[in-house]
Image (tube, rainbow, N blue to C red):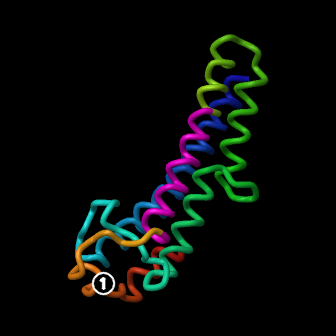
Amino acid sequence: MVYQGILLDFFHLINHAFFKALLFLSAGTVIHSISDEQDIRKMGGLLKPLNFVYVMFVIGSLALMGFPFLTGFYSKDTLLEYTFSTFTSVSLFSYWLGLITALFTAFYSLRLILFVFFFESSSNRRIVENLHNISIFVYIPLFF
């Protein structure tokens, strides 16, 4: 029984590493393309100029949220199901803590996508005018 829990933890850890790597690569691409601006409040309206990065960002965010048919769903759902089925007070607390954490993760992931890609930019005009596309050598790791 404990062996199964360790395998589930490891499965979720490996999946989490892959979609977090995709999110960090996507975030770095966005930051680099807008002249190294890191304040999310100054970003916005990047859907058209960075549409490929947007798609990669959405895929990584959906996997992080545990959206069905993506790896995050299988690892997170299996882990939550395992903690719920062991019937101890610690596992029940872990289940509710994991469920609340998953809800907060979905909230901040959607907020991030809305702020960066959909809302109007509040940065100065110089940053928006100097927005540049990224070379193909950055898109290759994002794709894989």
The amino acid sitting under disc 1 is: Leu
Residue under numbered circle 1: 131
- The structure residue drawn at horizontal position 41% and vertical position 61%, both measured from the top left corner, is 24
Local crowd size for mark 1, using a 10 Å CA cut-off: few (<14), some (14–19), many (≥20): some
Q: Nearer the viewer, residue 31 or 79?
A: 31
- The structure residue drawn at horizontal position 62% and vertical position 56%, both measured from the top left corner, is 63
Quadrant occupied by the N terminus? top right
Q: Nearer the viewer, residue 48 or 14?
A: 48
Name the quadrant containing residue 94. Answer: top right
Residue 44 sits above or below residue 63 on the image: below
- The structure residue drawn at horizontal position 48% and vertical position 84%, both measured from the top left corner, is 48
What residue range appears in magenta?
100-118
x and y, in percent, of residue 10 in the image: 58, 40
x and y, in percent, of residue 76 in the image: 66, 42
**Residue 131 magenta:** no
Left/right placement of residue 141 relative to residue 144 reads left
For numbered disc 1, what is the local secondary structure?
loop
Residue 28 sits above or below residue 2 on the image: below
Name the quadrant containing residue 26. Answer: bottom left
